[in-house]
Amino acid sequence: MQTRKKYIFLTFLASWLLLFFFGGDRLRRFAFFSGREARAPRNWPRWTDRSLLKSFADPEELQSDGDPSLPSPRARRAARLSVYRDSRCRMETCFDFSRCEEHGFKVFTYPREKDQPISESYSKILASIERSRYHTPNPEEACLFILSIDTLDRDHLSSQYVHNVDEKIRSFPLWNGGRNHLIFNLYSGTWPNYTEDLGFNIGQAILAKASFYTESFRPGFDISIPLFPKDHPQRGGERGWLYQDSIPPRKKYLLVFKGKRYLTGIGSGTRNALHHIHNGKDIISLTTCKHGKDWQKHKDTRCDKDNVDYEKFDYQELLHNSTFCIVPRGRRLGSFRFLEALQAACIPVLLSDGWELPFAEAIDWGKAAVVGNEKLLLQVPSAARCVPPERVLAAQQQTQLLWDAYFSSVDKIVHTTLEIIKDRLLPHRSRSRILWNALPGGLLALPDFSTHPGDFPFYHLQHGRTLPAHLSTAGSAHATAPVFCTPFSGSSPSEKFTAFIRVVSPAGSLSQPLLRLIEAVSGSQYCAQILVLWSCEKPPPPSGKWPRSAVPLTIIQGRRKVRGPGLSDRFLPYAAIQTDAVLSLDEQSSLSTSEVDFAFVVWRSFPERIVGFLTRSHFWDAEQRRWGCTSQWTNELSIVLTAAAFYHRYPAGEGLAGQGARPHPAPSLPPSPRYYHSLFTEYLPAGLRDLVDSLAACEDILMNVLVAAVTKLPPIKVTQHKQHKDTVPQQVACKEGDVETPLDGEQNPSPRHSPLAKVKDTVGTTGSWHFYQRQDCLNQLVDWFGYMPLVSSQLRLDPVLFKDQVSVLRKKYPRLEKP
Amino acid sequence: IMCASAKYNTRGPALIPRMKTRHRIYYITLFSIVLLGLIATGVFQFWPHSIESSSDWTVEKRSVHDVPVVRLPADSPLPERGDLSCRMHTCFDVYRCGFNPKNKIKVYIYSLKKYVDEYGTSVSNTISREYNELLTAISDSEFYTDDVNRACLFVPSIDVLNQNSLRIKETAQALAQLSRWDRGTNHLLFNMLPGGPPDYNTALDVPRDRALLAGGGFSTWTYRQGYDVSIPVYSPLSGEVDLPERGLGPRRYFILSSQMSLHPEYRSELEALQAENGESVLILDKCTNLSDGIPAVRKRCHKNQVFDYPQVLQESTFCVVLRGARLGQAVLSDVLQAGCVPVIIADSYILPFSEVLDWKRASVVIPEEKIPEMYSILQSVPQRQIEEMQRQARWFWEAYFRSMKAIALATLQIINDRIYPYAAISYEEWNDPPAVKWSSVSNPLFLPLIPPQSQGFTAIVLTYDRVESLFRVITEVSKVPSLSKLLVVWNNQNKNPPEDSLWPKIRVPLKVVRTAENKLSNRFFPYDEIETEAVLAIDDDIIMLTSDELQFGYEVWREFPDRLVGYPGRLHLWDHEMNKWKYESEWTNEVSMVLTGAAFYHKYFNYLYTYKMPGDIKNWVDAHMNCEDIAMNFLVANVTGKSVIKVTPRKKFKCPECTAIDGLSLDQTHMVERSECINKFASVFGTMPLKVVEHRADPVLYKDDFPEKLKSFPNIGSL
């Protein structure tokens, strides 16, 4: 034994020595031998004469990069126009901007021909455009044209394939080589190659196509849209499936796929490999060969077993219970699966090389999906495991944000397409990526209102504050009174508000309640100005008659409408409103200074919501199968009346923010009306606006529905001292819709359980007509939105020491509690 | 090789005991044969490489002029022209990059050679100062590898930054003979000045086959989206001139144009603007009457007035960046450095790093045709937005334009993000300046969801040994309709929890978790047993809350799932005398914290508390056995930017730490300790994240003149 050991050790020693002698350089570089012995990697040498090296270009060359021999810019632009056409189109060469200048962004749809059948999906697309605020029936003022020929399915084997499109479009007098046309397409090409060919020449038209291949995509010109099924809802749409943010965010399965396996042909490379990652535990990847007519012919050895496994799992169940969903290419690049996964908050793992992702011009897909590589399928499981829980949680929420903002209905898909094109027309008034990718999404953040995130009520938290870091620690030493000397000006909500009082009384004189109201409001330390909207027949009293107050008081002559109440008056964007916060008031509203103060302080914590005193709640009337709303005392609220409420001027809208602070000479042109657009006047199409306009008492509901649709949150009720009950004199309003006093429901609290009973109860009394109006209005709005946006809340915000057994002297708002 | 020898090493000793004497010779022979074979392989493996490498890296200190010369025969192969249809999935070999725990691509740099043609004339300048800086930066970065076999990306040392200084055909031949060229797959070229007279192509004219191009001055027709990288044209001035960041005050000029040799047509359009708008527009040009010795590149003139360049850029709000012969202009870099908002007028230009940078936040893009309308377009930009754009412009320069290093690393990071998309850098990290990153929040629960009521909440009671009181709390809490589970965290290691039979019988599952150490942070551990989103943390002595109050608290939490919703409120105050923060538990009109002795919050915050608490706060709390609730308040406020919600009226809560012995003095030390905590945490967080509010949440009909029995939560405020 001894000798043998010796031998062995000797050989060992020898071999090691030899190894080191020959291969030492190499070995020492492995981590195994790391430490001091490891040789430093060969970096780029530090040349001894590096300071003498010449610059890549001399400064003169860099700064005067011009060539006088070049043709003039105008000539070059003209030359570009002729070269870059058709497959090389860009907005600047193929789109006629001048058509959009005079009338703005207007879209014309060709009249539908009777003998021309249109698929369900395409008629939904056309309906969406016709419902949008950009639609115009007049081709003269149109900026964009949409064909009435169904171009969605261009697979010539399909039954919906329209023949002789080329001929037809050439006969259209407006076609103009496709200029300023937008063509929608979902399917192109056919077996076996599924090319991008549409079977007709689209010329210079913009193509909005599903399954877009990057190579044929004309960047900045075409638009990639998602593939959607024909039963995709026209409007509203189902909400996403994420109801809660579970911790840990990982679900039962890590990664799932259930779908066809292509044995041959295009796309089979990826689909044929998917079964490899199936582990039966947390990764479920099921494929079936059973599809198409002759699947038996191509069948391989796996097929039978796979087909059996395939039936064991339910697709919906997998969608609901998985963290990641594989979205591989089909025969074409896009699939229904993509939207399905997005809705299910199952983070899509895209295996579709060369797919130009839907709306990638606007949407930052990196936040919501994993863009994989078909070649690296086998790495997908380990990559999915590596994603940290924070990122998973954020991506799950982002899928829901995107689904709800851009994909859940045909309306949203079409409107997103239009908005992207509209953003290209005026690059300086377009949405930055923040507006597209943060709540509430690009369709609700209108650049006509502002392009600056700080002007909206949503982004003040994500967007940081403008003051440099070092000031804030010491600066926020504010916890003592006054509470709101916060140094964070910048994006945080404004520190003052504008009171906006609408006067409709016919007397032409100043009523007592109005004088009291002005006095109370102007007493607030946060009040910046008071605007009085005088919408009566008689002219407002001369300025001398108005009470003298510490804050500026402006009187605006309202519109007098012959027909119905001038609903929009209140929400018209008034340039005079300089603050973010608006306190909307009716002349009959009766508030005290402390109520105003407290409500404003609360609003500053919730700038995106309506904060007010008087509330209503909505309910589903199962008997009449419609929505109703009640003013009775309930334990819930979902509507805050705008007769006395704070809101951000954004929902009502107002442009030209910060114009006053410009250090440069004011523009010679008067501010263009374009800047006065708003969510209210712009987001809703004119038709709906007129309809709502004609219904009395709709403004509260409209405002609440709009804000709830944007924020998905309930309004906030603050406590109100009820001393003024019954003191409000019943006045005959100058508009018929205003008979109701803001308090009518609350005067006779009747202890009934069913809201329905209450509604019936009030029929026949003074407010009855009003109720019908409100309900009509609510149902019209719900119909337009496609869902009920209102959200209920069970709480009210009171001052911290409200009705606590503490000395009144200690309380900041004692007046709110007086019996 | 390493794996093989290691195996050998471990197998050796294991063999010994099994050996029989008669087999000894046989084994030794076999052994030696294997060994010799191994050595031979080793020799063959290592020999040529070691020769090659040693010769390369021994010469560290040498001059650029000493590099080896490579002669290119006239007929040496030429790569094909760039393929416009190339994309990452078609022309890039991802297999070279592989799965990698660090998610970093490996970049190899070819060693420097001097290329000459058949006649010995050099093909180009060997290397420029900037390209040398760029390669140095790559080689100093995490991306670098000196092992050509492990590289994912190859950077030739052939300098093609400026097309004017190279011979196109010969440079292409030089590229083609690189050892791993392989049609240019995974090769990255850097070019800043493409094209040449007369047509000035917008991409490098050197045929380069499949190589990726990081180019300055791409147009939308030459840029292969998702494949090429658009980079800035570096301005060497930034190394020479120090322009300190300028405040956000008003600037003298509204629009400034500083470019020389603009096309006369552009110039006349700009001059028309100036004529129309007077003093606020300044159009500068080259100086014609400078005395010798003054570098013309550092001066600009308007009529007879001389201005310093680039200092004059800081005097203006907007600075025009017009296309010249090329689309990419070095002046963009100078303009950003001056914190002037660039007005980019170059149709179809792909802005630098536009794949990741949001230029709408830092610049105004105007179509060439709209130059006459420029003034009114710029007037419509709100003042607040201008200020942000100025800040953003300066930040872009500092992060991505400032040096060749910044340009190189941003380029590599973009390519890296394409290869490891699941680890890619986010929009915010690319675009938010440090001040915004510092002061903004990214709420982890940003989606406005109202969680389903059916889910209910999990109550967590932290207890040490107050069994009697604990049982009372359990009984009380179990009456709340939405309670779905009760978790008792038994923090006493010296004592066992009571037997199962002794616990109160309640309608929901009750679990006891025993902890390894008596730590306060055990309360905030994200136990797997917590299956609901909502957590109610409750002390084992809080028996004064009614079932209605707890149920209402849960309902309020559902409306504010990203906040702390609690019962006893507290306030932080700035003590002007002591110049530090003070803790306040008096009956004040304001609230900035709620005690976690009774509070609802999202389970995610348990995860954050346990794994992501900044600094040493967690250990500090465990060591001091105090302030875990203040730490939680800081954490939540900091990550969400939102205030707490206090629910229901004030109650007499027992002070947990105060015992009956010496109430007053203990109370005072308690307050001092709590104040210490606030100051400590504020310094760790680097800010005071707590938000002060004046409201609390009550049921809609609270204290209203309305029959109590019809209220959802009648029993509130009693006791």
Image (spheres, grey):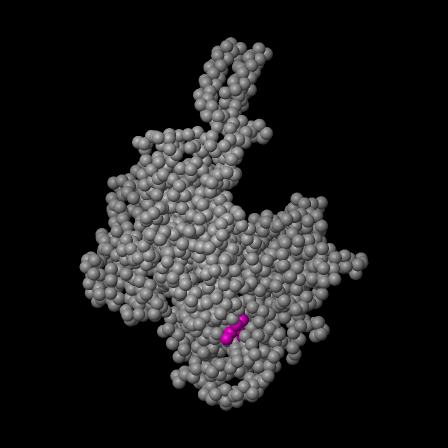
Q: Is residue A361 visible?
A: no
Q: Is A20 rendered above or below residue B69?
A: above
Q: Is residue A42 visible?
A: yes
Q: Is B169 rendered above or below residue A486?
A: above
Is residue A752 shown left or right of residue B211? right
Please provide percent x and percent y for residue B275: 42, 67
Q: Is A580 covered by the magenta stretch?
A: yes
The quadrant holding residue A360 is bottom left
Q: Is B308 rendered above or below residue A484?
A: above
The quadrant holding residue B161 is top left
Please provide percent x and percent y for residue B336: 49, 54
B387 or B477: nearer the viewer:
B387
**In the image, what residue occupies the spot 71% across and 45% down?**
B494
**In the image, what residue occupies the spot 53% across and 21% down?**
A20
Q: Is B681 covered by the magenta stretch?
A: no
Q: Total marks drawn? A: 0
Please provide percent x and percent y for residue B262: 40, 56
Is residue A200 shown left or right of residue A617? left
Q: Which residues are magenta?
A: A576-583
A258 or B394: nearer the viewer:
B394
The quadrant holding residue A204 is bottom left
Image quadrant occupied by the C terminus of chain B: bottom right
